[in-house]
Image: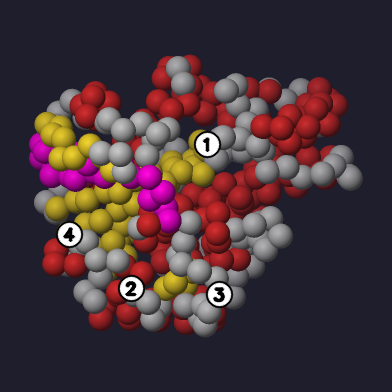
Amino acid sequence: MAVLYGIDEAGYGPILGPLAVSCAGFGIPDEIIAEDLWELLKSAAAKNKRGLRGRLLITDSKKAYSRKSGIGHLLKTVLALTGVRPESARELIDCLTYGSLRRPADYPWYERLKNQSLGYDIQDLSISSEVFSRECQKNNIEFIGASAELLDAGTYNDLIQSVQNKSSLLFTLVCRLIALIAKNHPKEKIQIIADRQGGRAHYSRPLAKMFPYMDVAVIKESENISSYLLKGGSEIKIHFTAKADQRFLPVSASSMVCKLLREIMIQSLNDFFIAEMPGLSPTAGYWQDGLRFISEIEPIIENKQIDRTRLVRTR
């Protein structure tokens, strides 16, 4: 049995709201490790909304979510996979950012997460979860779990000072999850798939820097994929490839986890400031509209003496 994890991020570009980096893992028989999991689990999971017929949508989060349709598909898939049944948004966040993983601080704009109900249908969720579990069992596949690093703007700004740029910060978070996976599976064969980091094609040096206690060997470096073998206690194969969240089910699952967490938190931020300024248009936090939002809430920032470095990313 091999262990296959996907790693993805949500919120790399915005100036408001969190940066989320998550992983989702499956135990898979060695002989089918390279198979298309959507095909193997097609009776219980699909990558397109059309024709779902009760199956779970597991896909690139950009296809699963829109501001118009909301977080419904994200929430159903994440809860069905993880088995978590949270009573509040904050409880969900805490379940996925356990132990040494970073989680958001209790800033005023995140306070309402503690009482924010997620409003899911337990019966519908249980049926989809059972169907997915049964289909996994038929193929000797097991969903292992999901976890996330969730950086609010304050933590993001603190860390960016030490690593100097966004791409290095993102790679550091990816490597923290790789280390967590290795710790949780010390005796198993591990494979990890992640999206290309900023278009980079060569990763042996940064991997060696992040894992000085492991030997790093290049398996393949090409236009489409960069693969490495890390040995030292654990044995890990890591693949960085373009559009991984569209091509590999574990990466899609991870994509949905981090997108769900980010959207829950940006909604809380919007709700806080709209309550202070009725009529304020919400924001997704990206650069141009984020600047508009910040400009409009300037009176609230001044009146409440909000530390701007806890709310807005510095880069």
Gap in Å between the C-alphas at discs 4 and 3? 32 Å
Q: Amino acid at mark 3?
A: Arg
Q: Residue at x 46, y 67 (%)?
A: 47
Q: Are marks 3 and 2 in contact (CB under 8 Å)?
A: no
**According to the image, label 1 marks what residue?**
12
Label 2 is placed on what type of residue? Glu
Tell me whether circle 4 and circle 2 mark residues in contact (CB < 8 Å): no
| Magenta-tinted stretch | 227-246
Give the spatial CA distance, label 1 vs label 4: 30 Å
Say which element carries label 3.
loop
* Residue at far right of view: 279
Observer-nearest residue: 204 or 226?
Answer: 226
Disc 4 versus disc 3: nearer the observer? 3
Q: Residues within 10 Å of mark 4 (few under 14, many from 20)?
A: some
| Residue shown at 30% from the left, 74% from the top | 40
In the rendered image, which quarter contains the C terminus? top right
Residue 289: percent from left, percent from top:
73, 36
Q: Secondary structure at mark 2?
A: helix
**Discs 1, 3 touching: Cβ within 8 Å:** no
Q: Which residue corresponds to mark 3? A: 50
Q: Are marks 4 and 3 in contact (CB under 8 Å)?
A: no
Q: Is residue 102 magenta?
A: no
- Residue 218 location, x and y as percent? 16, 35
Q: Where residue 39 is drawn, which disc sits there?
A: 2
Q: Alpha-carbon neighbours of circle 2 within 10 Å: few (<14), some, or many (≥20)?
A: few
For the residue marked with disc 1, what is the amino acid?
Answer: Tyr
Give the mark nearest the N terminus, 4 or 2. Answer: 4
Residue under numbered circle 4:
2
**What's the distance in space between the residues labelled 2 and 1, CA to CA?**
31 Å
